[in-house]
Image (spheres, grey):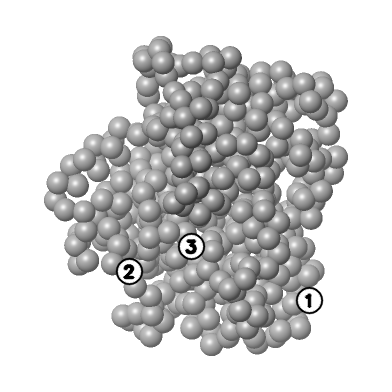
């Protein structure tokens, strides 16, 4: 990991040097040719206000913007940079692989190695199909569940986000929640009618829907630990209750592990929480930060996917050799080095406790939600357990804090509705600086 004192001095500005002139100019320019100036909505800083930072490069725990400001990164590319940015073994593996071409559209041995590695790490996966994003993974898993059961409806939870396929854009978290988008023009009523929703952690509501739509529900899809309305944890017995409903009603239980997979533990949330899913979806972490997703599960279900079955799903870039080599290198490291998870857990706990002490001392209403290396701070006097309670937190206060943190060289997600992700390149010094910045904020 690169150390602060090894950085060129202009990449290590003090907070008082914080300027974003180049980012401002780039944002103006970007809006002339890119919708809203960004290629993914949450990046636009629309809810927190101000100008999105244009990032030039990153190394270890730090991001550097075009104005040469340095930031401690709590996004980690929304999860995959779990060992820090530009992790040397991954960079090297990519450099070597790229010499042999960047895409074949034909099978490679590396794809088998990747599937075999995933099977050794993750419970309940006999077969795994690579795709290019978490959106694709969730979309394909839902189609498979529908094809397998011959049913159309499915249950998702308010504030959970499963990518931007039409069926999932109902009461979704992440950017939909951030921008308060209730219905998405272009998603047909016919599609939305098959999407049933319940509050997260409300088992009774799910039981009620299962009774009401008996024999019609193909799947229940859930983020086992939510990252798209801030970090929200499953109440004791909630996931177990869903498992029982799925078993009793012949419903496919899908864990969306795009955020939790290989992050909460080497076996993801299934292993960490000791619950079996029928299908699991993964995202960017499987590509070591490159564009990759995957879905997998038991053979009895997965064998319905083409070319074994007629549930069609395909992609030229699926199993792309460069992405596979990056992901394989990362997953191997995570598998072989369990101390990574112990370290991340200790660091995240240290951060949670430090922030908690500061906010208590300052008399602020808050809740810190955390599991493993996922964490979020909600300015709330009530427990944050679902979308409703997350929305009732003091979001304007978070937005102000966000800018204070930036000015102090700390990059949080630009929305109160996103989890923060720690990476193992973070030092305790970085965590202390973050805690100190919570203390120096004067607008609680
Ligand atoms: N949907 C992602 C976070 N939940 C944000 C993706 C991005 O803007 O890069």
The image quadrant that residue 420 belongs to is top right
Residue 388 versus residue 139 in the image, above or below: above
- Secondary structure at badge 2 equals loop
Residues marked 2 and 1 touching at CB (< 8 Å): no
Residue labelled with disc 3: 135
Say which quadrant the N terminus sits in: top left
Alpha carbon of mark 3 to alpha carbon of mark 2: how far? 13 Å
Q: How many other residues sit within 10 Å of disc 3, few (<14), some (14-19) or many (≥20)?
A: many
Instruction: Note whether residue 435 is visible.
Output: no
Residue 311 versus residue 13 in the image, above or below: below
Residue 150 appears at what percent x and percent y? Answer: 53, 87
Residue 75 appears at what percent x and percent y? Answer: 53, 39
Residue drawn where x is 67% and y is 45% of the image: 47
Residue 23 appears at what percent x and percent y? Answer: 49, 33
Residue drawn where x is 44% and y is 39% of the image: 81
Q: In the rendered view, does 396 fall on the left or right side of 112?
A: right
Say which quadrant the C terminus sits in: top right
Along the line of sight, which residue is nearer the eye, 228 or 148? 228
Residue drawn where x is 40% and y is 41% of the image: 334
Residue 93 versus residue 120 in the image, above or below: above
Residue drawn where x is 59% and y is 84% of the image: 152
- Secondary structure at badge 3 equals helix
Residue labelled with disc 1: 208
Q: In the rendered view, does 249 fall on the left or right side of 300?
A: right
Q: Earlier in the sequence, mark 3 or mark 2?
A: 3
Please state which of the two labelled residues, at mark 2 or mark 1, is closer to the viewer: 2
Q: Earlier in the sequence, mark 3 or mark 1?
A: 3
The image quadrant that residue 356 belongs to is top right
- Secondary structure at badge 1 equals helix
Residue labelled with disc 2: 315
Alpha carbon of mark 3 to alpha carbon of mark 1: how far? 28 Å
């Amino acid at each position: 990991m690169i150390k602060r004192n090894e950085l060129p001095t202009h990449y290590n500005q003090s907070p008082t040097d914080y300027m974003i002139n180049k980012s401002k100019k780039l944002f103006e320019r970007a809006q002339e040719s890119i919708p809203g100036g960004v290629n993914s909505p949450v990046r636009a800083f629309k809810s927190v206000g101000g100008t999105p930072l244009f990032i030039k490069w990153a190394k270890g725990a730090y991001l550097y913007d075009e104005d040469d400001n340095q930031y401690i990164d709590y996004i980690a590319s929304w999860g995959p940079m779990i060992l820090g940015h530009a992790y040397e073994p991954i960079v090297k593996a990519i450099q070597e692989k790229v010499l042999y071409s960047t895409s074949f559209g034909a099978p490679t041995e590396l794809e088998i190695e990747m599937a075999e590695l995933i099977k050794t790490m993750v419970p309940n996966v006999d077969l795994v199909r690579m795709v290019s994003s978490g959106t694709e993974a969730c979309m394909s898993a839902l189609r498979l569940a529908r094809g397998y059961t011959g049913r159309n409806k499915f249950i998702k939870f308010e504030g959970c986000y499963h990518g931007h396929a039409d069926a999932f854009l109902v009461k979704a978290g992440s950017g939909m929640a951030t921008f308060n988008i209730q219905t998405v023009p272009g998603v047909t009523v016919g599609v939305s009618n098959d999407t049933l929703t319940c509050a997260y952690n409300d088992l009774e509501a799910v039981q009620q829907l299962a009774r009401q739509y008996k024999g019609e529900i193909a799947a229940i899809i859930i983020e086992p630990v939510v990252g798209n309305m801030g970090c929200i944890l499953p109440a004791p017995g909630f996931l177990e209750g869903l498992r029982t409903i799925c078993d009793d009603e012949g419903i496919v239980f899908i864990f969306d592990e795009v955020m939790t997979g290989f992050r909460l533990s080497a076996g993801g949330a299934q292993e960490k929480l000791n619950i079996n899913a029928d299908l699991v979806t993964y995202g960017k972490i499987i590509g070591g930060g490159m564009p990759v997703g995957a879905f997998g599960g038991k053979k009895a279900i997965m064998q319905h996917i083409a070319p074994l079955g007629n549930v069609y799903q395909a992609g030229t870039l699926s199993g792309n050799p460069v992405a596979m080599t990056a992901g394989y290198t990362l997953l191997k490291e995570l598998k072989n080095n369990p101390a990574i998870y112990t370290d991340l857990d200790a660091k995240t706990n240290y951060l949670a406790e430090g922030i908690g002490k500061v906010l208590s001392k300052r008399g602020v209403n808050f809740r810190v939600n955390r599991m493993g290396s996922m964490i979020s701070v909600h300015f709330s006097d009530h427990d944050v357990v679902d979308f409703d309670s997350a929305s009732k937190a003091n979001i304007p206060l978070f937005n102000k804090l966000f800018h204070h943190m930036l000015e102090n060289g700390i990059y949080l997600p630009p929305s109160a509705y996103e989890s923060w992700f720690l990476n193992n390149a973070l030092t305790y010094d970085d965590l202390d600086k973050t805690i100190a910045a919570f203390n120096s904020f004067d607008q609680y």
